[in-house]
Amino acid sequence: MPLDVNRFQQQYKHHLKTTPGGQAPSVIETDVFIVGAGSVGCTFARNILDKTASIDKLKNTKILISDLASPAFPHHVQNHENNMGYQQDIDKFVNVIQGALSTVSVPPSNAISQGATSIVGELSTDWVCATPNPHAEELPDTFTKSEWDVLFKRAKELVKSSTAAHDEGIRQDVIKRTLNDAFKSDADRKFESLPLAAQKPTPESGPRLTLKADTLTVAFGCADNKIECAIIRDFITGEHSFVVAKVYVAACGAIRTPQLLWNSDIRPAPLGRYLTERPVAFCQVVLGRNIIDKVEKDPKYADRVKRHRQAAPGDSIPIPSDDPEPQVMQPYHTARPWHGQIHKDGPSPGNVDSRLVVDLRWFGSGKVNPDNRVEFAGKIHSEEARDAYGMPQPTFNSKPGSEDQERNSRMMSDMCEVASRLGGYLPGSNPQFIIMEGALASNCTGTNRAGTDKAMSVVDKNSKVHDVQNLWLGGDGVIPSAMACNSTLTSICYALQASDSIVEYLGRV
Ligand SMILES: Cc1cc2nc3c(=O)[nH]c(=O)nc-3n(C[C@H](O)[C@H](O)[C@H](O)COP(=O)(O)OP(=O)(O)OC[C@H]3O[C@@H](n4cnc5c(N)ncnc54)[C@H](O)[C@@H]3O)c2cc1C
């Protein structure tokens, strides 16, 4: 059927600003349109390309991805933190992260972080590559145990998660040994290597995949429970276009995905609700004399220490300057429902040699509560209130309950107990609860959650929006449970299941 562009223009004129020169918006046709080129959008693209390649009817399936961010590198997936300058002085990197953030929520708001920050470009800016498996208690019941096992195996292979990159480090070994010795009477507590997605995939370029950067997806046009187009705006040219596809995917973060649906007048009651945060307890420790002595005297490290002494005879610290950073975790446990990570990620105030400093971050989980929510213009503010991109202004309305506060306080004590076995607090980095950079915006779950009950969920098990034929969602907002451990791997599991179902749908239409 020929496209009725005039009708689109009439019907969606409230989303169209004048295109320069007054031309009509162009029309771009594709098979699958994905909003968001973060790790979840890329998972959708990767899996659909792989699965359709061997199916005759689908082997020419074309995908278009739009992302509002500018490409910083020819390889979009390159992490800025890999830049040699930052690798040599990781403390400088914090300024890059700060520069990439922008405020999302505005008053009135009772969220912990009123000045919460926007998407950080995750993979390219400050995704710390942590890919631990969640504990069974953190996982929602969307899938059975055996389904989760298969999805996690696929997700870990996709992001090339392993502990190999850091396991040869002296500090990695000495910290794990010190803590496992210190807590050996506690059979339930163990310190292990934190798996990292340390090898980055190369993005596919080719006739089947197109990435349109600097391109905001303004809204979906929905008629008769079906998306008939997406309206996009190119920031560089100012031009609007209609994208017409068979399948639409919104994977643009836990706040911007419900925002996009809201702006598209797709507003099921649970949209934006069940916003579940991850409280973070933090401190920095200067490794104690006992640990440095262990490095100095333990025959296990003798060769590396000797080589270092020869190369840097004046250095009083026995740790080689190229020793990989420690990446240690204390997994979630029923008795301790939080997830601890020991590594070196933040800057260290003062003049302490950064080889001697480790960060402790203990991640908790809030109770899932429908009243904790993000609301968009039209609810708190007038429909006209817009954010920096011209999208409906989000405002967070979220606070911890008494159960959360009690658990957070136990989590803080646990972190302090572990810290005391490693050394003393770095002045200025005493134990504190922190709002992680971008935390509320890119580190919460539940805002477009999966479930079977339409009154309490936005998407089904396959991440397809209830009652909309051809719209799938991705990202942390889909996860209906509270997660202490890092969430990307779980979101990738949902995206794998969702994109399997998209391939099945494409085979039918
Ligand atoms: C500081 C920090 C560190 C983290 N480290 C880890 C970690 O080590 N391990 C882990 O598992 N998790 C980590 N997380 C969580 C992780 O960032 C999320 O799980 C992950 O980003 C989810 O991926 P995504 O693709 O759904 O969303 P995002 O990475 O947020 O990608 C969404 C994309 O959509 C684009 N977009 C948004 N709106 C629009 C629109 N309307 N039109 C076009 N494009 C749009 C954005 O520009 C963005 O590129 C971290 C979070 C933070 C804040």
Image: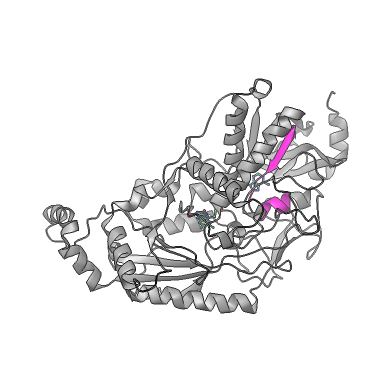
Mark count: 0
Which quarter of the figure is the C terminus placed in? Answer: top right
Which quarter of the figure is the N terminus placed in? Answer: top right
For residue 285, what is the image quadrant?
A: bottom left
Examine the rendered structure and indicate whether residue 304 appears above or below residue 109.
Answer: above
Residue 385 x, y percent position in the rendering: 76, 59
Examine the rendered structure and indicate whether residue 164 appears above or below residue 282.
Answer: above
* Residue 418 shown left or right of residue 7 in the figure: left
Magenta stretch contains residue 69: no
Identify the coloring.
one colour
Q: Nearer the viewer, residue 114 or 223?
A: 223
For residue 95, what is the image quadrant?
A: bottom left
Residue 214 x, y percent position in the rendering: 61, 41
Examine the rendered structure and indicate whether residue 502 appears above or below residue 454.
Answer: above
Examine the rendered structure and indicate whether residue 244 appears above or below residue 446.
Answer: above
Q: Nearer the viewer, residue 172 or 462?
A: 462
Residue 14 x, y percent position in the rendering: 83, 45
Region in magenta: 240-260
* Residue 246 shown left or right of residue 428 in the figure: right
Magenta stretch contains residue 247: yes
For residue 160, what is the image quadrant?
A: top left
> Is residue 393 visible in this depiction of the protein?
yes
Residue 467 x, y percent position in the rendering: 82, 46
